[in-house]
Each structure stands twice: as structure tokens, then as C-alpha cells.
Image (cartoon, grey):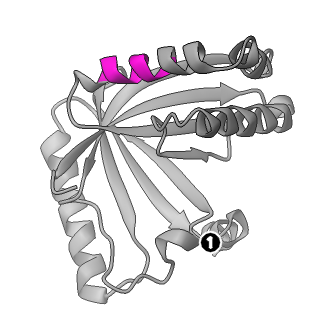
Amino acid sequence: NENKNQLYMVHEDVVKPDMYEKYDAASKGFVELFNELKISSMSSASMTRDFRYFYLTPIDNYSDIDKLQEEWDKAIKNAPEGKFEEAYSKFEGCYDTHNDYIVKKHDDLSYWPDEPRISVDEINYLDWGFYRFKDGHGKNVEEIAKKFKQVYLDKGIKDGYSIYTADIGMERNVWIVVNIYLTYNSFAVVIAW
């Protein structure tokens, strides 16, 4: 997308640690049902070390939120009798809280090398870093992000990252940096290093 501020609708589930295996199975079943019904509203899913699950859907503008609801309604209507309810019920007890919000991905602040060490198809782990700052410091944070990207460019670093900012539905003084890794173990080696 040429848009430097691509919007994403994010659905986040904060899963109970002792229920993540049940949640994973329920989530996979739900995705299979959506694929079976040819519903394409989710584009990517990932999980953090603290069992927060994120489902991102690109949107062109805020009115696309209505289209997402229409996709859900279509899934419920077109699913075989009771199938949607059955799939949804498998999440029962897996989480106490969830949230929906919109973030903007900033291509001008994100970094993706021309020849990345890890191709998009090889990515198996995303590390979501949430960075909070005080009111009035947004421009400072943006300048730091620009300098950080320039270091990556100057050094020819082969690992990319994406920067998102909070838009609607979450506190505004949050930037999210998503780093990519082959596996969780490769991420663990980096943080232990």
C-alpha cells in the first residue's frame, strides 16, 4: 500500500496463561471456519509472550469498520446451522478481557531492508513492544524513530521492524514497534545477548 499511514483494525484478546492451548485450538478452528466461508477480514495474527493475541485487518478508512461488521454478519448468516456458535463457544473461559482499536502503520518510520535476513514467508515470531511517553513528547519520539531508522539504513542492518501509533480506541501516547524473528527461540537469543 502506498499510504504512509496504513490503518489497521486490531482485535486483541488477553488470554489466561493456563488457557492458551485451548485458545490456540479455538482460534485455529475459527480461522478454518472463516476460510471455509471465504471471509477475508483478518490478514494476520500474532501472540506476545504475555499471551496477548492480536488480529490485524487493514482498512482504508474509518467507514471500513462497518464493512468488517458486515463480514461478521455474513459469516454468522452463511455458516451451517449452529457452526458459528459452536466455533465461538470454544473460546469460553479463555480470556477475561479483549479490545478493538485502530492503529496506523508508519512506512516512513518503519524499516524493511532491500535484502532482508528473514523473508516475509519465513517470519514465525513477532515481538510487539509497547512504548508509552508523556503528553507533549510525540514529536521527540518521532525524531528518535527517524534517527533509529537512519542508523539501520547506514549500517545496512538486515532485520526490519514496523512502527505503529495508536489512533482510536487506546491511549494516544503509545507507539508499537514490531520486530520480526524466525522463531521465539531466535528472539530469546537476541534478548539474552
Q: Which residue corresponds to the image point at 52% horizontal and 37% vertical from the top-left?
A: 55
Q: In this view, does 123 lie above or below 7?
A: below
Q: In this view, does 94 lie above or below 30?
A: above
Q: Which residue corresponds to the image point at 75% horizontal and 22% vertical from the top-left?
A: 87
Quickly name the residue at label 1.
Answer: 182
Q: Is residue 82 above or below residue 102?
A: above
What is the quadrant of residue 58 in the picture? top left
Q: Which residue corresponds to the image point at 22% horizontal and 59% vertical from the top-left?
A: 109
Q: Does the magenta stretch include residue 69?
A: yes
What is the quadrant of residue 64 in the picture? top left
Please state which amino acid type lies under the numbered disc 1: Leu
Q: Which residue corresponds to the image point at 56% horizontal and 13% vertical from the top-left?
A: 77
Q: Position of 174 compared to 25: left or right? A: left
Q: Position of 149 compared to 92: left or right? A: left
**Quadrant, the N terminus:** bottom left
Say which of 114 and 190 sits in front: 114
Q: What stretch is highlighted in magenta?
A: 65-72
What is the quadrant of residue 166 in the picture? top left
Secondary element at image label 1? loop
Q: Is residue 177 above or below residue 35?
A: below
Residue 49: image x %, image y %?
67, 47
The overriding secondary structure of the stretch rendered in magenta is helix
Say which of 134 and 176 sits in front: 176
